[in-house]
Image (cartoon, grey):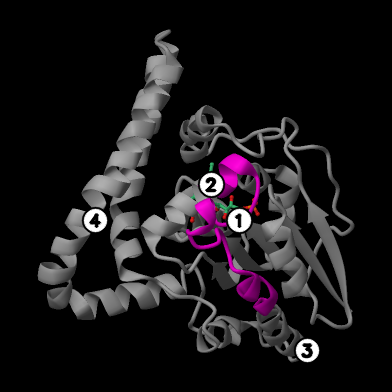
Amino acid sequence: MKKILCVNYSQSGQLDEILDNFLSPLEGCEIDRIKVEPNKDFPFPWKTNSFYDAMPETVLEEPIELEPFSFKEEHYDLIIFGYQPWFLSPSMPATALLKNREFKKRLNNTPVITVIGARNMWLNSQKSVVKHVQDAGGKIVGNIPLVDRAQNLLSAVSIVHWMMTGTKTRKWGIFPLPGVSQEDIEGCSRYGGLLNDRLKNNELSTYQDAVLANDGLRINTSILFIEERAKKIFYIWANIIKKKEAKGKNRAFWISFFRFYLNFALFGVAPIILTIYTVLIRPLTLNSLKRKKEHLSYLGIDRSK
Ligand SMILES: Cc1cc2nc3c(=O)[nH]c(=O)nc-3n(C[C@H](O)[C@H](O)[C@H](O)COP(=O)(O)O)c2cc1C
């Protein structure tokens, strides 16, 4: 009987529901299902200040304390690691898990599937997760990122509404519903079914091919363009804020400044730059874009087998 570890944190319960659906088709496996909680929980619903205040430590991947938890097994046949990106990085509880000594021991020499419940920007966080997993000796064999399919700016407005009110409803009754759609949450069982077949036949090396063939991962060109630039800027902001704080400067002031910058960049600057990129540059780079997307669809996955 295969021993599987499925571990995640979820603030609203969205990622829990995604993983429950993912796991539902698995037959004849022993599943150790662990939901981690931070020792000091993050507010939900968030307040505007606390939301942006989480940025520096998230981006710099400073580990937080988790509530005590324990694994049933010393070694698993497969680890399913569910996480959500925060500020283009793994969320703080996810980072804490990736840096946990006991978890790292279980990652060593073990196949890992990542299941992501994001708004729509998961590429940078996945690069980081892949590195942590590989540094611990784990082998990424699959990645299923579930995202909000609404247009980027609309989904940015609706997710803030969700995070600030704690309710997954339409802002003013007119914006799209925030987060991963109920259809995609429930449809995630499809990828569990594909896994079930491959577990039986010991064919995990073909799992990501099956995920891609079943529409399990999409990379939007505009989002890719933003993600390629934004993380570097987040690092600069995170370091500036930490340095100012260390010098006794008012952290709250610098966080408000970052908040202003982020909203200006997202709603003011990005649409103009993206229009110029889409019209003038993108048509000249179609081949390299295709290669980049192919590479990102298999990030960290060994395709030589
Ligand atoms: C502080 C914070 C920052 C976030 N940053 C991102 C991000 O950079 N990219 C993204 O796709 N989603 C982002 N999200 C959305 C989360 O990835 C996630 O989809 C949402 O919080 C629901 O997850 P849950 O299952 O923990 O409730 C952010 C959410 C929070 C609370």
Which element carries disc 3, helix, strand or loop?
helix
Query: Sequence order check: which comes first, mark 4 or mark 3?
Result: 3
| Quadrant of res 155 | bottom left
For the question of whether residue 91 can be seen, the reply is: no
Separation of marks 3 and 1 at Cα, in angstroms: 40 Å
Q: Mark 3 points at which residue?
A: 200
**Front of the two marks 3 and 2:** 2
Q: Do the residues labelled 4 and 3 touch (CB within 8 Å)?
A: no
Q: Residues within 10 Å of mark 2 (few under 14, many from 20)?
A: many
Task: Indicate if the residue with disc 2 has its beta carbon within 8 Å of ligand 1.
Answer: no
**Front of the two marks 4 and 2:** 2
Separation of marks 4 and 2 at Cα, in angstroms: 21 Å
Question: Looking at the rendered structure, which numbered label has been put on residue 161?
Answer: 2
The amino acid beneath tag 4 is Pro
Q: Mark 4 points at which residue?
A: 271
- Stretch of the chain drawn in magenta: 161-188
